[in-house]
Image (spheres, rainbow, N blue to C red):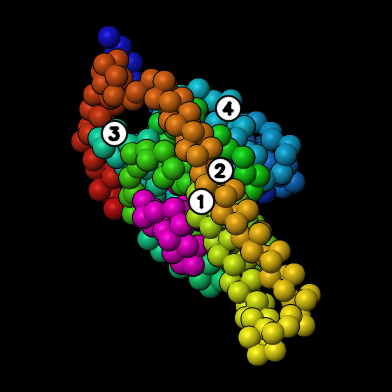
């Protein structure tokens, strides 16, 4: 049986974070000295890669612009037992990484989300805070109540989550896709409430309230179509049927009064909408079966990967838990709290 510690990788996707990335890397090196730290630079123009390299991180460049492309590349490239992902803007405390890993190990989760305690203070932008509330409510309404903060960028993953996650998003929608993947396969997940800091002077958010909000809303619709097609096409079918009934009512009234169908265009449109409604309903039934089959295949692939609670990993986990439970580590955590 192995006596080595678990292999931990800290993942930091970055775009123009020169003002903060050096301090973030040094913070994670101090909080998790046994971890390998990777910074994936997404075409930064302000020296982000150099600051990260000087701080001791392994730096890789991803040319496709967008956080989703960066995360997909990270998950494909890096081999580890535990993956800890954070942002490079300094809003997440590196000291909290230990607690995320501890939660992943003790609760046997495949993903732990560090929910943001002070998310409403996101750089003072009330549009972001309002959008967070709306999208979190929408997520719970469509996909389930597994998560309360689907946009948190501070997450801890098991290897089998990372290697079974079919990332397709290109931008900031990637966190939503991760959450839907976990909810769809009913994976064990946990949440841990953490403080969320403000960006330091000179660091600016890359989010656009309306542009990125529109992308996320579109991703919600696409993920609903892929994972809950019966509900998605059922809603469209109901809308088409209601329009059909709306157009047909005046035609029926006129027919019962005069015995003639004088509004032929309205009647033809009503019939066409009725046919569309039935076609959408049928498509929903068929695609629901397809979606179930796809979910079963994803689940089978996920289960074929090594369990984090295997016998060898249990020894590694015991060593790691003993390490972070040392008095020095407890003192550090207490000071951070």
Q: Residue at image x 37%, y 38%?
A: 187
Q: Is residue 261 magenta?
A: no
* Figure check: 292 above or below 198: above
The CA span between labels 2 and 3 is 33 Å
153 or 311: nearer the viewer:
311
Disc nearer the start of the sequence (1/2):
1
**Image quarter of residue 202:** bottom right
Disc assigned to residue 287:
2
Q: Residue at x 73, y 83 (%)?
A: 260
Q: Identify the residue at the far front of this view.
A: 259
Residue at the spot of label 3: 108
Q: Is residue 272 left or right of residue 218?
A: right
Of residue 190 and residue 285, the one placed in the foreground of this image is 285
The residue most toward the top is 1
Tell me which residue sits at (25%, 48%) in the image.
334
Q: Residues within 10 Å of mark 2 (few under 14, many from 20)?
A: some
* Alpha carbons under labels 4 and 1: distance apart: 32 Å
Residue extent of the magenta highlight: 133-156
Q: CA distance from mark 1 to mark 2?
A: 7 Å
**Lower position in the chain sequence, tag 4 or tag 2:** 4
Mark 3 closeness class: few <14, some 14–19, many ≥20 residues within 10 Å = some
The residue labelled by disc 1 is 230
Circles 3 and 1: CB atoms closer than 8 Å: no
* Residues marked 4 and 3 touching at CB (< 8 Å): no
Q: Seen in the image, is 133 located left or right of residue 208?
A: left
Relative to 142, is 247 above or below? Answer: below
Which residue corresponds to mark 4? 76
């Amino acid at each position: 049986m192995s006596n080595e510690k678990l292999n931990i990788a800290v993942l930091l996707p970055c775009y123009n974070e020169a003002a903060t990335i050096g301090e973030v890397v040094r913070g994670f090196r101090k909080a998790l000295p046994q971890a390998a730290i990777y910074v994936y630079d997404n075409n930064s123009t302000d020296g982000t890669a150099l600051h990260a390299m000087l701080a001791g991180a392994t730096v890789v460049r991803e040319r496709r612009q967008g956080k989703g492309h960066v995360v997909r590349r990270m998950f494909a490239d890096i081999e580890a037992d535990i993956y800890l992902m954070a942002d490079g803007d300094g809003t997440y405390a590196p000291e909290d990484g230990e607690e995320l890993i501890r939660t992943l190990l003790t609760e046997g989760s495949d993903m732990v989300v560090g929910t943001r305690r002070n998310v409403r203070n996101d750089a003072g932008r009330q549009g972001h805070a309002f959008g967070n509330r709306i999208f979190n409510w929408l997520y719970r309404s469509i996909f389930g109540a597994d998560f309360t903060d689907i946009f948190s960028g501070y997450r801890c993953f098991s290897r089998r989550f990372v290697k079974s996650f079919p990332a397709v998003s290109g931008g900031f929608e990637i966190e939503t896709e991760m959450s839907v993947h976990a909810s769809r396969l009913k994976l064990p997940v946990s949440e841990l409430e953490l403080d969320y800091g403000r960006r330091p002077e000179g660091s600016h958010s890359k989010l656009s309230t309306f542009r990125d909000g529109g992308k996320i809303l579109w991703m919600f619709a696409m993920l609903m179509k892929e994972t809950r097609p019966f509900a998605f096409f059922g809603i469209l079918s109901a809308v088409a049927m209601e329009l059909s009934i709306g157009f047909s009512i005046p035609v029926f009234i006129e027919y019962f009064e005069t015995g003639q169908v004088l509004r032929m265009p309205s009647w033809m449109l009503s019939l066409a909408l009725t046919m569309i409604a039935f076609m959408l309903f049928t498509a929903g039934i068929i695609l629901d079966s397809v979606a179930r089959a796809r979910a079963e295949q994803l689940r089978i692939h996920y289960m074929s990967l090594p369990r984090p609670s295997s016998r060898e990993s249990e020894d590694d986990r015991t060593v790691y838990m003993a390490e972070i439970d040392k008095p020095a580590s407890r003192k550090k955590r207490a000071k951070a709290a």
